[in-house]
Amino acid sequence: MLQSKEIENGEYHDLYTFLMKDLQLFKRKFIFSLKHVETGESQKCFFRYFERPYQQELIRLFNEDDFAGILALPTGEEGKCATQLEGRYVKSGKLVGLQVIEARPHEGGRYVGLTPAKVFVDQEGEKIVGVVSKLHK
């Protein structure tokens, strides 16, 4: 597992930048398409929204890699929940990336990584892609 580093106290690099720039696992194919550099698969991207009372439990489960536990948490509505689980993956599981983020509209609309971005590649990703694809509803 690869994890992004803390960039400020309690804040982490965002998953997209971590995958594209730091790890260079995707390349641009045309302006609107990102392809995995080895498999040529297009990435799937999703956000799962959680209400504030579930934020600490979400972070705990995320840190424990308990993605099945995250599936059991109640979800909130898009646009009404600042706490989000962002996921990017390819169907084969050769790459699965996840991060818990928070939208901060009161800070100019920026997004803050509440956890390091976690990236699972090859066999690690293939093991969890099934449950992660269920998070993508």
Image (spheres, rainbow, N blue to C red):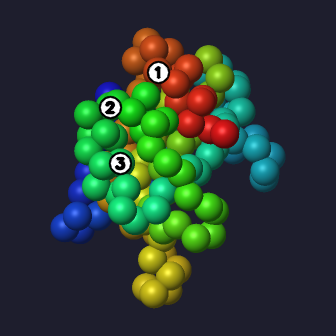
Is label 3 in a helix, a strand or a loop? helix
Q: Foreground residue, 59 or 93? A: 59
Q: Are marks 2 and 1 in contact (CB under 8 Å)?
A: yes
- Which of pointers 2 and 1 lies earlier in the amino acid sequence? 2
Q: Vertically, is 32 above or below 113? A: above
Is label 1 in a helix, a strand or a loop? helix
Is label 2 in a helix, a strand or a loop? loop
Distance of mark 3 from mark 2, alpha carbons? 10 Å
What amino acid is labelled 1 in the image? Ile
Distance of mark 2 from mark 1, alpha carbons? 10 Å
Q: Which residue does the numbered mark 2 point to in the structure image? A: 65
Q: Residue at x 30, y 49 (%)?
A: 57
Q: Residue at x 46, y 37 (%)?
A: 72
Distance of mark 1 from mark 3, alpha carbons? 17 Å
Q: Residue 12: where, in percent of width, then height?
A: 32, 58
Residue 8 found in image quarter: bottom left
Q: Which residue does the numbered mark 3 point to in the structure image? A: 58
Q: Are marks 1 and 3 in contact (CB under 8 Å)?
A: no
Q: Which residue does the numbered mark 1 point to in the structure image? A: 128
Q: Residue at x 58, y 70 (%)?
A: 80
